[in-house]
Image (tube, rainbow, N blue to C red):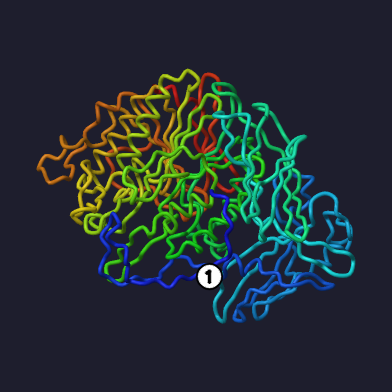
Amino acid sequence: MRNTVRGFLLLFIVLSSTVSYGDDLPVVVPELALVPYSVFQNAVTSGQLNNIVGGTEEGLILDLNDPKLSGQVYMSQYPFEGKETVYDYAYYMDEAAKLSEGKAVLPLADFYKSKYNANAWVQGETSGATPTVEYRLRLFKPGKLLGLYASRVSFAYDGHTFRKLPTIIGGPYVTKVSSDDPTSMEIVWETDELCSGQVNFGAKSYQENSVSFTHIVKISGLTPNADYDYDVESASSDGRIVRSETYSTRTAPAKGQGTFTFAYASDSYDDVGSGGKTYMGINRDILDQISAHALRSEAEFILFGGDLVMGYSADKENLDFQLKAWKQVVSGYWRNRPIYTAVGNHEYIWNYYEGDETALAKWPYTTDSGEAVFAEAFNNPENAPAVSDPRRPTYQESVYSFQYGPALVICFNNAYWTTGFTESAAEIYGGCPQGYIMEDQLQWIENSLSKAESDTTVRYIFLFGHTPVFPYTKHVADGMWYMGNNKVRPYTKNAETGKLEPASQGIIENRNRFWKAIAQSAKVAAVFTSHEHGYHRTLISNTTPVGVFPDDDTDGDGVLDKYSPNPEFVRPVWHIMSAGAGSGPYDTKGYPTPWTPEKTSSQYGYVLVHVENNKVSMELIGGVAGEVLDRVDDLMSVK
């Protein structure tokens, strides 16, 4: 995430089929018409949703700048009784107002009536957190339900007129909490106006050095493994100030020390099962339940393995707005503990071409690719490897590692620079098939694992990424498997000849090399992946039939004909696919694979991992009741 001044831009971008800089790209530009197609298109922009245009005696005036929009407005004091609960949430009143011709008055005066004033707001009071409401809109256009949208607004009230204040519409978020430097962390938040920022952390205050919409403040000089209270405030140029509630967070332990719990979840985009609860590309209800339960379970951090939002977008503003909504949903957890995210195939901005339904990662990659928007939206560790070809997208903030106590966590990106949607698309136009780990990233992973093996402060290693290494349900035709078709591989256009050149290794060789590095380590407890909505747990060892190339390609056509165990997988390692954070469930039966999971489930859910002094246990928490649906007492006992 870069601390930049960003205005609100138009959501739709008029796409042109003429690309003047095609010669500088590592792909071939198709001679096809571009289609401005997004799988999910938000009905309003962030700018529209936060467009408060004035105040009255009753409240604030919201103008969505679209007279065709109508709907209902629901409201909550936010956070609802925040001093009494650790997890911030909204408690909506029944329909508070009508939205007509794109406009509504948010009836804030109701919250100063004893019946509705659960937060005990007092007219004219300026101390403590700034009065803030969350408003949820159920939007319609003639004959069509558009779904749910929500934002927040802070205000002042003197007993006569309501006046809008700068508003914290995102965060604050606790980021970069790790044992790599357990004496520091960064606090991030977003405001709807240009503001200066300050964090009051413990007994000190930390000033931001710039005026911005996105605020990133580094906190330093802290004690490892210690609890701290903090709040943030932002001031506009005319002196209006917004102040957050007070939150509690914790620094990481020193390297090699401590026991702790963390959570793993993924795939929260809106899909089958959410019905009328469509929320800006997200299954809000399930994602909110999981993040709240993770905090209640005292998870010190959440790893989220991609497919946060529906995505698949033709323009970056649409994807960025969905990611803002995702952060809003999980903010009750994130204000107290960090979340680390991976890129999924849905965090994708594409050039979508008419005719053969081909999609290429959108360029210019430095600004318009899914990787660029993802890096802008989050504040993950910035220790990614450099790309070997500067024409490709960066790995920054989608490939990284961090240590927490005795555990090393490695985030890999195998949904990178994707060309879809057929096995031959990359061969025709260039780019990377989903699941493939490019050589520069793979070398970095190998080196990271090798270095950790001799690091005495590291007892356990966890890897996480999106695409399953050993798929079992719907994605056996892609993943890192492609039904054993080793011909699948990336292609890069040669800058001098203009011809596409294939990577030296196919997908099966690439997968086996990746898992060989993992299996050679005595410290890897599990590899977590996503993509196949639900859960499956498989122990991969040197007796598991996985397929070896070229030995199992008996007729030499590049496709495996049999599936042998790989003797280079010297140590057993758990492959745990957990992707139940809200996307529609997949059937767990009827998909042919050489390997067989020990446990499968289609329930919504997530994984809790307990890191102890002498073992690592794992639980699948699933279903509407949060039951323990699967458990491994010690992931390391198979070594």
Return the residue at label 1: 10
- Residue at (57% x, 62% y) in the render: 279
Q: Nearer the viewer, residue 54 or 58?
A: 54
Q: Residue 161, relative to residue 488: is it above or below?
A: below
Residue 286 x/y as whole percent: 57, 52
Closest to the observer: 294 or 591?
294
Q: Residues within 10 Å of mark 1 (few under 14, many from 20)?
A: some
Towards the viewer: 80 or 400: 400
Residue 262 vs residue 354: left or right?
A: right
Give me the residue at 58% from left, 46% from top: 290
Position of residue 67 relative to residue 352, above or below, is below
Asked whether, in this view, residue 30 is left or right of residue 163, the answer is left
Give the quadrant of residue 170.
Answer: bottom right
Q: Position of residue 620 (x, y in %)?
A: 51, 38
- Total marks shown come to 1
Specify the quadrant of the image occupied by residue 30: bottom left
Residue 254 pos. (x, y %): 59, 24
Left or right for 58, reference 625: right
* Picture coordinates of residue 570, whole percent (x, y): 30, 24
Residue that protrudes farthest toward the left in the picture: 555
Amino acid under disc 1: Leu
Q: Is residue 613 above or below residue 284?
A: above
The image quadrant where one finds the C terminus is top left
Q: Secondary structure at mark 1?
A: loop
**Figure quadrant of residue 66:** bottom right
Of residues 18 and 448, the one nearer the viewer is: 18
639 versus 158 height, above or below: above
